[in-house]
Amino acid sequence: MIMKKVLFVCHGNICRSVMAEYIAKKYRDDLYCESRAVSYEEEGNDIYPPAKRCLDRHGIPYQKHHARRIDQKDYERFDVIYVMDGYNMRLIKRIIDDRDDKIRMLSCKEIEDPWYTDNFEEVYMLTS
């Protein structure tokens, strides 16, 4: 069986995208998932502690994480790339040539950055 390869992308890759990655890994055994950022700001950093606590509350397992910025090689490796909001969409289009139309919004609703809103439960609900 060939698994669909999905990449989740947010601003720093320490909250939304990594939460979506591990939620998908728990509930979707038909997908291969990873996550990335559109910025270098958090490169190398682990999951933000409040995001870990939210995943813990919901029984979502995770591993040590190292935030990374997306690049064109990632685009080639994945079948679909989901971003969290319109700002991420604008930034990713500057980084990646989306010639195969792989980049999409994850939700019809903007998934706001909990780094600013502190609303990790909403991110959990919108990404699960």
Image (spheres, helix red, strand yellow):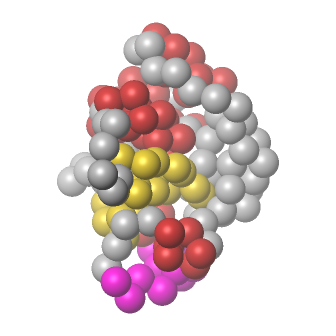
Q: Give, as a single range, the part of the protein colored magenta.
A: 90-100
The image shows residue 66 at horizontal and vertical percentages of 72, 44
Q: Is residue 76 magenta?
A: no
Q: Is residue 31 above or below residue 6?
A: above
Looking at the rendering, which quadrant does residue 126 occupy?
top left
| Residue drawn where x is 42% and y is 35% of the image | 25
Residue 85 in the image: above or below residue 114: below
**Residue 125 relative to residue 50: left or right:** left
Q: Which quadrant of the rendered structure holds the C terminus? A: top left
Residue 94 painted magenta: yes
Residue 78 visible to an observer of this rendering:
yes
- The image shows a total of numbered marks equal to 0
Q: Pinpoint residue 123: horizontal percent, then vertical percent.
A: 39, 34
In percent of width and height, residue 108 lies at 21, 53
Q: Is residue 111 above or below residue 62?
A: below
Query: Outermost residue, left direction?
Result: 108
Depth check, front residue: 83 or 23:
23
User: In percent of the image, x 53 and y 51: which residue is there?
Assistant: 35
Q: Nearer the viewer, residue 121 or 96?
A: 96
Asked if residue 69 lies left or right of residue 125, the reply is right
Residue 25 vs residue 119, the one in the foreground: 25
Residue shown at the point (46%, 28%) measured from the top left? 120
Residue drawn at (31%, 79%) of the image: 101
Instruction: Decide if residue 119 is in sight here.
Output: no
Closest to the observer: 72 or 31? 31
